[in-house]
Image (cartoon, coloured by chain):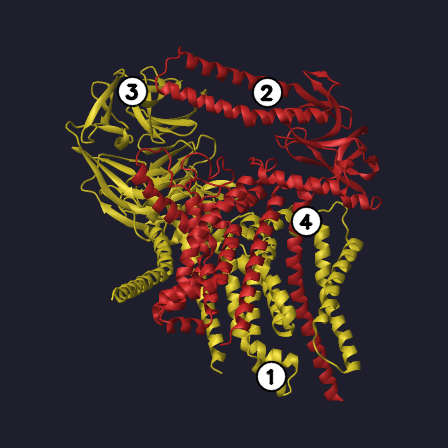
Amino acid sequence: MIGVNESKRRNLHRVRADKAAKFLITLGGGIVLLMLGSMIWHLMKVATPLASTPTLSIEQQIPLTTPLSIEFIGDLMSGGMALSFDEHCHLNAYQLNASKQQLVKIHSLPFLCSSKVKLAEFRGKPILFHLSKSGHLRIDQLRLEKQRINRQFMASMLIDNFSGNIEDWQVAVAEDQIMIALEHQTQWQVLLSKYGVVDEVKQLSFDVENTIVLMPRLGRAVIVNQDRVELHGFNSKPPEIFEFGDHVAKVVPVFQDHGFFVSLEKGQLVKWLLVNKEGTFVFHRSFVLERIGRLKDYWQDEREHLGIILTAQGTVNFINSVSGEKINRIELESLPVFSQKVEDNLYFQHDDHIEVRHMGNKGAAINLSSLWDSLLYTGYQEPAFVWQSASSEGIEPKYSLIPLVIGSIKSAFYALVVAVPLSLGAAIYSGYFLSTANRRLIKPTIELLEAIPSVVIGFLLSVWLISWSINAIYILLFSIVFCPFLLVIWSVIQHYIVTKRKIFSVQDKDLWPIVGIILLAILLGYFAGSFAFWDERGGELLQLVGGEAASRKNTLVVAVALGIAITPTIYTLAEDAIYDVPLHYQQASFALGATQLQTLQKVVLKVALPGLVSAVMLGFGRAFGETMIVLMVTGNTPVSDWGLLSGLRTLGANLAIELPHSEVGSGLYRVLFLTALLLFFFTFVINTIAESIRSRFYSRYDNV
Amino acid sequence: MTMSSSFLNHDFRAFLAINISAFFMLVVLLLMLSLVSVVIYLGASHLWEKDIYLVEFTSNSHHKNRYVLISNQWLSNVEKHSSLSISYPDPKRSAFDKLTIASSDIVRVTKPSNVASWYLHSGQVKFGAAGRVLEDGNATHDITLAEAVEKIGLAEQHISDKLNERLLRLHKVIAQLDKEGGVSSAPKYQRYQTQFNDLQAEITRLRAYIAKFEVEVIDATGNIETIKLKDLLRFSYVNQLNVFDKVVVVMSNFIQLFTSTSATNFQSGGFFPAMFGTLTMVLLMTLFVTPLGVLVAVYLHEYAPRSWMTSLIRISVNNLAGVPSIVYGVFGLGFFVYGVGGQIDQLLFADRLRSPTFGAPGLLWASLTMAMLTLPVVIVATEEGLKRVPKNLMVGSYALGATKLETVWRIALPLASPGILTGVIMAIARGAGEVAPLLLVGAVKFAPLLPVDGTYPYVHLERQFMHLGTFIFHGTFNSLDPEFGASMIFVSCMLLLIMVLCLNLIAISVRNKLRARYSTAVPE
């Protein structure tokens, strides 16, 4: 009795275990789907914000109890200061209190009431200009140290013949020079001074009727005269004049004076950009924005393609700063009195409060035209496809994917040119002609080539590049030239022997003469090379063929290296396709009197064709995604050029180079994930098509 | 007549077709063999000690002598070459300089037997004859060079093995006493303190003793340079060695490279950390990928119903195998490192860490990424193994009343184990050779610490590590001197290649055995 119970319990236990195992294993099977799914999901999750728009969310509202005329706002949200002048000749510094609700005065700095003071902003830091009655100008950088304003001396100078009697003045700061414009009774006086060189003060004078805008980095004064904009330099050259059909409302220099915006009365906005015209830099019209409204302020994010326009109607417009496309617009409640961009925050001062708005998803300014269009970039001659992720002041990053896609396709295509004849030729011989015993030996040996780590192939090729002399290339070229001749000659001899003996069958021992032919070709190549062109210095071929411009690490080398790497991939699949052609097809062909060659041409290759095509496609997919070889063998220069002797950079290599240095969540990071997604889908499509062709090929004769 | 001539024509074309396809096959075959042999040759020639020649030549009408390496090509055919390119150790850097001398300027090339190559710990090499042994700056005749070197070796060993260990123990004891609030005037405390001081003095004394010895190295022009023996790694009279001696030297060089830690300049040191890192990463990867791969394969072959879901899984497996490896790296960086790792950091160490621990590339994430990359390999191989399990054995098991789990566990899996093994070995080979994703998720150029060491918790999954493949990658851009194989990258290439090829050969032979066992022994 007990035994039966016992065994019942055991059986129950076994069944339960079986069911549990089934559940677990089914779950495990789903892991593959989960993996693929999470891969696509994650890549998409990072890349898709590019397709949406930047946001401008309200971060904080800071009430102002007394009206302030704020002249500078620093990074208030993380402990920076705001500065304002009051009527008692004090410069006051304010900070947010601990709860970030209230603006508190922390220090005030007195100055002489008879002097004029002005604040300028340079790289987010306040610069104080202090002009005394006697014409002495002192420039300080202001810092917050231990709750006090600290004046750090930058430069000082004496303005000659200063009457002490000016209506207004303007100041502007650049890296190594400053510009000031003084409004006298009848005219503007503009001065440019380099730091440290006190006596080098240059002057310009203009009619006081005109509005004036300073471009300190270029050393130009922009004069706005009705519908004309004039750029005056301090040299003797005539001013650059730009005519507009409309009244010019405002001119705003942007991007370290590498360009400027001209806002017209009727709401048009025109961007001018410094471009390279045969070696000299001139301003060129970049784009026109229609119906945007009158410009009040403009900021640009230097790492993304984000331009932020504040219009006089109180709307914030996000645009792509390179192509000029509008991305989205956000209405503010009212037009702010003062506004400033600090890092990712925009500070808008209204009469009774300061509104802090945070810009999110800045990378979304990178849109389709940034990625796929040819655009006019700063300092370029004409619109171009450029990838250059590094940005510096005044140089915007360039995210065109065209050079990378061209690089990937180019390298994969040329690799196929090398690999296809090699691998298909090899596949035909070992799949069709070779005896089974030798096939068992030769096929795995060739397949071992696939096991060689790509980093080793990349290393070998790049080492050879260093010592690659013209002699080696001559030997190779001559050998390649000799091979077809030798093969034809050998075929003629074989043919002659056979017609004498009347026997015709392919045997593996016939391979040895071919080995001999290869060695002979190399030997002949060596002799011919040394006889004809031996160069004692072992100079370089590249300079002879391609001149100085040719890149040493060029596409030709990539083609060879990648070709070697994908040859075994194509070979294995193609060989299987040929070998798996059912024997009875061949036997039927032979029975009908076809020769071996006819059977190969008309039967075997025809049946195996889908398999061969899918093999080549898979090889292309592998070459397209291969990273290490391209990374090591090329110079990784992203150029949009299909030439054999130029450099290239592929999508994969680009990822390996750029991703470790890119900031998480930045536009570059998202663009890189987008390229990874591209790579993924491209290989996915190629693999799926190739697999379906292949499975159709196998299912076709399964039914026969 | 026309019949026969066209027939002949066809025959000729047949020969041509055969010969051309045979030609391509042989080219691929030779390519494969020559690639392997070139890598092995280059690697071995780096370890091989080359003879040093004395070249006397005139340069700018000055007579110059120099100990140099010259290529065998030149030696085999002196008349033909109009110039001689020589290379010699740079006196300041750990690299070789090159010079080309016109044949007309060469006075004489000889092979002196008294010249030795001196390898310093810093990676520098010097060529020169041994001069006097100096002790405290004065020549000593009591002791030969070999004896001095041996003495110093013994002293250094004594320091590192015995004294340091005792010092450490004493230090711990004293620290313990301090912790317990021991009074520094207590006799026990003082006794330990004295012992500690004595030991330290002993070590200082020995160090000073070691530093006393120097050797003079006389270069070709007769200039004397003194080298402190403590800086000397090893020296050998290359020209006195015969082939067998050199083989021994090659072996010892190899072992030395294998066991010593790396230096940042790719010139000195060895690749133990890279080797160790590769193995640790691959081992971890195997732990992840084997159970998972087998599970999926068992599901696909035994459990999966014939449904669209199953074919979707199959398509996924196929596609995962085709996804470029760098995409896995991108995913690993974004998902594992910044996603999962960042979360772990926030949960466990929020605010306590200055720099990210798990939220930075490291060993764990690297091996997880590589496990994803190699999963299809294991699945496919295991499934092939399962396919070859004879149906009648399975059916027999069911007939005896075994459940599915028992049948799979007791019959299918043991019989498929060679297939699983093949898959795992091939995954290891792939994991050891694949570099692109590692550039993103954790392998670095130079890692000061090993991922496994003596400090708690002994295995540091979050640490960055070195990898043979990335070592080669970084080395390629750092130093290249192929002619004389001055870079150890060649050796690591050889090692990586041999490792991967051996793994593959083992996998192939296991697979072949598996095939042979079931294709003949068991009838369908």
Please name the amino acid that badge 4 sits on. Answer: Tyr
User: Which amino acid type is shown beneath numbered disc 2?
Assistant: Arg
Give the red chain's letter: B
Residue B104 is drawn in which quadrant?
top right
Subunit ID for the residue under disc 2: B
Q: Which quarter of the figure is the N terminus of chain A placed in?
A: bottom left
| Mark 2 and mark 3: Cα distance apart in space | 51 Å
Residue A552, visible in the rendered structure = no
Give the crowd class for mark 2: few <14, some 14-19, many >=20 residues within 10 Å. some
Viewer-nearest of labels 2 and 3? 2
- The residues bearing labels 2 and 4 have C-alpha atoms spaced at a distance of 41 Å
Task: Judge depth for marks 3 and 1 and give the one in front.
Answer: 1
Of marks 2 and 1, the one in the foreground: 2
Please, what secondary structure does the residue beneath circle 4 have?
A: helix
**Mark toward the start of the polypeptide (2 vs 4):** 4
Image position of A648 (left or right of B370): right
Residue drawn at the location 26% of the way across and 31% of the way down: A76
User: Horizontally, is B162 left or right of B350 in the view?
Assistant: right
State whether residue A475 is above or below residue B83: below
Residue that carries the numbered disc 4 in the rendered image: B41
Q: Which residue is mark 2?
A: B207
When asked about the image quadrant of residue B398, the answer is: bottom left
The amino acid type found where label 3 is placed reads Lys
Q: Which residue is mark 3?
A: A146
Chain letter for yellow, please.
Answer: A
Labelled disc at residue A587: 1
Relative image position of residue A697 (x, y in whole percent) = 49, 75
